[in-house]
Image (spheres, helix red, strand yellow):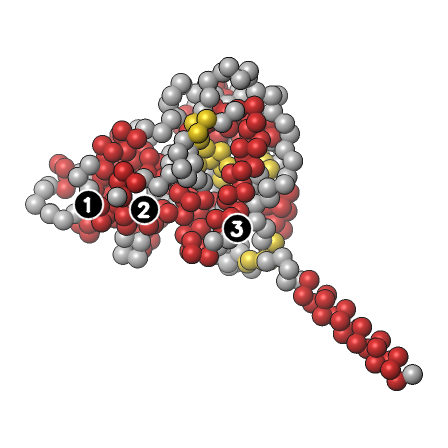
Amino acid sequence: MRRHWLLVGACGWVLLILMFVSKFINFSFRIPGDFGGRTDMFVWTMPSVTTKLPSVQWPDKGASQPYILSSVSPSVVDPIDWQSVNEKRLELLTTVCRNSSLWNLTHTTVRKFVLDRIFVCDKHKILFCQTPKVGNTQWKKVLIVLNGKFSKVEAIPENMVHDHERNGLPRLSSMTDKEIHQRLNTYFKFFIVRDPFERLISAFKDKFMKNPRFEPWYKHDIAPAIIRKYRKSHQDDVESVGLQFEDFVRYLGDKPGRQHLDRQFGDHIIHWLTYAELCAPCDISYNVVGHHETLEFDAPYILKAAGIADLVSYPNIPPGITRYNRTKVERYFTGISQRDVRRLYAHFQGDFSLFDYQRPAFLLD
């Protein structure tokens, strides 16, 4: 009789232990108290590579083929099988996210800063994470139409797209903890990436050279601060010469040293932060990661996979405009020391690895 009760007791303990351990089989993370003043538990899941998205009908095989950057060399991919391209991208993302040697470069706490980057379309259950300098303006237009603010993309005034008081695009950070949790776990989620160095060149040109939207703080506040700290020679007049790409590279490669400046610059730094810092791809399970270089195929695939292809069209993409331009990259990096380029690459190595962008050996070796 005693053995019977001992056996029953042992079984009970085993069940309790199994119940306790099962609570921790799935990792979890906390949203820091900097949004809403509260701390809630969020389920942490690696991006799924088994999710079956709708199959997409593509042009005939005779149509022009895009180039996909790989760790070895660009390879031609059949656009008819774009779903498998996305699955391979997510599979690589998952693998790199688990690489402990790159952990600090690929993982980001999902705090208010990240949630501010994610735009919501509740009507069609879509979340879009904004990664500047990869054609985000057009995707915002798509979401504005889906949210009912305008009937077609072409009718949206350019000055309204980035006016978040008027464009009708809520940010995920504006919602309650429960609403955030529910959307992150059930909505279709996507973002777009681009070769990291080419994106930095685009940010530099847009903010410090052309500045088409007239944002004077880049030239009048941010540029002088970077020059004072990172220009080797201060003999040149700051106002007449302005920020040089070499100054910009030196600033970006000095991750520990530029933290004080970044706090001063505030959210303006989103144009050159890493994709990991902006969208937390290792900590939020995205359905699709599109590539700027193959946007002519990624855009229709995303619309089809999100179930909105019959409701809205992505704006026309001029031929060749999204292709990687090695000549331009080489031109901008000419004259910059290999030491500074290597520091820059070390900071963006996580992005290169997560999204299968080729290591720029022509700059580093």
Please tell me whether residue 365 is drawn above or below residue 303 in the rendered image.
below
* Pointer 2 residue: 345
Tell me how far mark 3 sits from mark 1, CA to CA. 35 Å
Q: Earlier in the sequence, mark 1 or mark 2?
A: 1
Specify the quadrant that holds the C terminus. top left
Say which residue appears at 63% left-offset and 33% top-offset.
53
Q: Earlier in the sequence, mark 2 or mark 3?
A: 3
Q: Is residue 150 visible?
A: no
**Quarter occupied by residue 67:** top left
Residue 225: x %, y % from top left: 22, 48
Instruction: Classify mark 2: helix, strand or loop.
Output: helix
Mark 3 touches mark 1? (CB < 8 Å): no
Please tell me whether residue 320 is drawn above or below residue 272 in the rendered image.
above
Residue 116: x %, y % from top left: 47, 45
Please tell me whether residue 267 is drawn above or below residue 58 in the rendered image.
below
* Pointer 3 residue: 283
**Quarter occupied by residue 84:** top right
* Pointer 1 residue: 337
Q: Residue furthest front?
A: 72
Say which residue appears at 27% left-offset and 30% top-offset.
328
